[in-house]
Image (spheres, coloured by chain):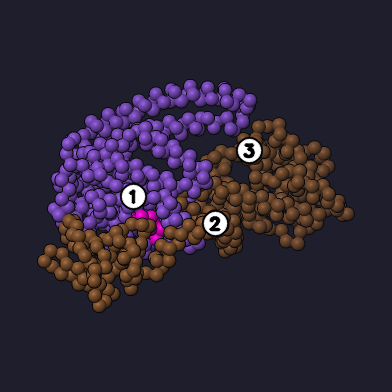
Amino acid sequence: MNGENQTPVVFTGKTSEYFGIWIVNLLLSILTLGIYSAWAKVRRKKYFYQHTFIDGVAFDYHASPIAILKGRAIAFALFVLYSVSSNISPAFSGILIIAFIIFLPWIIVRSLVFNARNSSHRGLRFDFTGKAWQAAKLYLFMPLLIIVTFGLIYPFISQRRNQFLMQGHRFGLSQMRAEFKVSGFYVAYLQAFLLSIALIGIGGVATILISQDGLKGLTTNNPSAIVPFILVYVVMLTISSAFLRSRLVNMIWNGTSIDHIGFKSTLRARSLVWLYVSNLLAIVFSLGLLTPWAHVRTVKYHADNMALLGEVDFDHFVGEKKAEIKSTGEEIGEMFDVDLAFG
Amino acid sequence: MTVFRADYFDGITAGAKVVEVSLLDQHLRFVHGEQEETFLLAALRPQAAVGSARRVIELPDGGRLETEDVAAFDRLRLPSADRFWRRLHMLENHLGWVLVSLVLAILAGWGMIRYGVPVLAEQVAHATPVRVEIKLGEQVLAAMDHQYGYFRPSTLTEQRRASIVADLKAYCLKQPQCPAYRLEFRQGGSIGANAMALPGGIMVITDELIALAQGNPAESNHEIIAVLAHELGHVERRHALRQTLQGTFSGLVLVALTGDFDSLAAGLPAVLMQMNYSRQMENEADQYALASLQRACIPPQAFAGILQKLQKQAEGGNLPEVLSSHPDTQARIQPFVDAEKPACKA
């Protein structure tokens, strides 16, 4: 791979600038009882997209705030219906949950389509061509096997899901290709698992040391005695999830290509650990005010560690004009926190 | 006259063509390759500026122009550039305005949860049919009985229960109007000596609390009635329903805002404010208890007595005082200690 043409991804966003957008978003969202949050989302995404460059040209985000607002209104109404009915008629809320699960694959695909079609680069739109039945297989039926196989099938499901997500995307008329080795996923998950075991051992010893030394004066039934346990647990979780994320994201991008262009992702576990821990501390101790700083540096780190491989002659890519798509799927997905992230 | 230099994308291929854009007689004009493009200014869709990003003009045929020459672009003052977005952009880019926004954002968020949510909850509580509220209360009680397993059936004798029920009825008859209630006896188990008002006027009192109140047999029911009077205060103001609604609404406000809000930072103040409401509700229930006990010829000191016993018991146990949502006991009981004993006799 070395010696080839590499084109870096450049992120030029600045905290000082994004802070203004973030705080105005927050203010108007509160003043309008959340209605503005649809506009806020467009502002935020536009800021990050328009400051991410490949070969001197940035991305763009086109979603209409009204489309997002409609989706949010539906999701909000469903959420209210659910939380009210769960107190009054558990049977009805059970039906709602089942209906939600049945529609979940459709929601997942719609949300991917909405996001892709509203993203563009160099005047060409992205698209997502995955089908709902594929999502049903990957997100509803395969998880049933997790219990039967004691979780051993999970890396396989993860591999299939990520292949589905990447392969489904198009830029203009060019489909992305993605081939990941199942064995790579098994190795990454196994390493993360062993790392967690080792950390639990170290964490246990550390906790005992901390509680004996630092908190000697406190009685055992003082609630603050569990603080070191929680801290150690959070740090452990951060380390192993950062490790897993760096491995998976690198593997996913390095196995993805579009036409003659490949990708190179070089995330490092220890940098991600530092990023997550410092972001968390900064946000907590600034009472949320450093959130924009955390957003900007997270995106910057990811952009800095991503490059395109091969000759980037963009004349080669062609597109067609797409009708806009309703946003219901995406916003319901967002509201109920459907996690489509890697891993 | 050349106005600015831009990258032109035709929307069909991804290649950028560098063009010199000029303005002539309400038309935008540029040449790429052999081809000349002209667009009426009014037909263009200039995008709202975001930060210092390149300025973008969307062309009616699906193409786009991107320019780094922000100053030249802004000088154009293209007619369809939305005034709303321009103002917004100005707001976002001036530190002074940003700071004003920051203060306003904090005040607005605080005000909404502090004042907006309780008013809304009260309105909704009043609009809620009593039957629905009772159903809700029954659900909560059933959950506490079975799902959470807080309670076991009461072991009180039938006689003892009847005497409490009768005394509560007598107390109620002396009130100008007594809210509809239903009294439930339970063994408290892990929650120990306690009494609570659930939605729909359902009041639960634990065997442990009744045992604690039994000191001086002649007056023992006074202390129990005093506690129940406090709970009836909650029932009368529909506190349990309001509290539930406030919790739900605060949650909904946060969910609605999390489109661009860090729930970690936002959640904590909301929880603290939630505790604050319940303190206010406790004070209201106390005031109700004080007035109604005097009307029923029961010395308000009975309430002070039972609270002190509870306090003493809590000190022995390992329940941290911070976790309690009840206001500081000493401050609470003072009005009851100071109150005049009723001239009449119960």
For marks 3 and 1, give the CA distance. Answer: 57 Å
Q: Residue furthest right?
A: B343
Does residue B259 appear in this view?
Answer: no
Give the numbered dot on residue B191: 3
Q: Residue furthest bottom?
A: B25
The front one of A18 and A201 is A18
Q: How many marks?
A: 3
| Position of residue A171 in the picture relative to residue B326 (left or right) | left
Please provide the residue range marked out in magenta.
A39-47
Q: Secondary structure at mark 3?
A: helix
- Tell me whether the residue at label 3 lies in contact with that at label 1, contact meaning CB atoms closer than 8 angstroms: no
For marks 2 and 1, give the CA distance. Answer: 28 Å
For marks 2 and 3, give the CA distance. Answer: 42 Å
Q: Colour of chain A?
A: purple
Task: Find disc 1 in the rendering and name its residue.
Answer: A12
Which chain, by letter, is brown?
B
Is residue B39 in the magenta section?
no
Chief SS of the magenta region: helix
Task: Find disc 2 in the rendering and name its residue.
Answer: B103
* Residue A114 screen position, x and y as percent: 29, 56
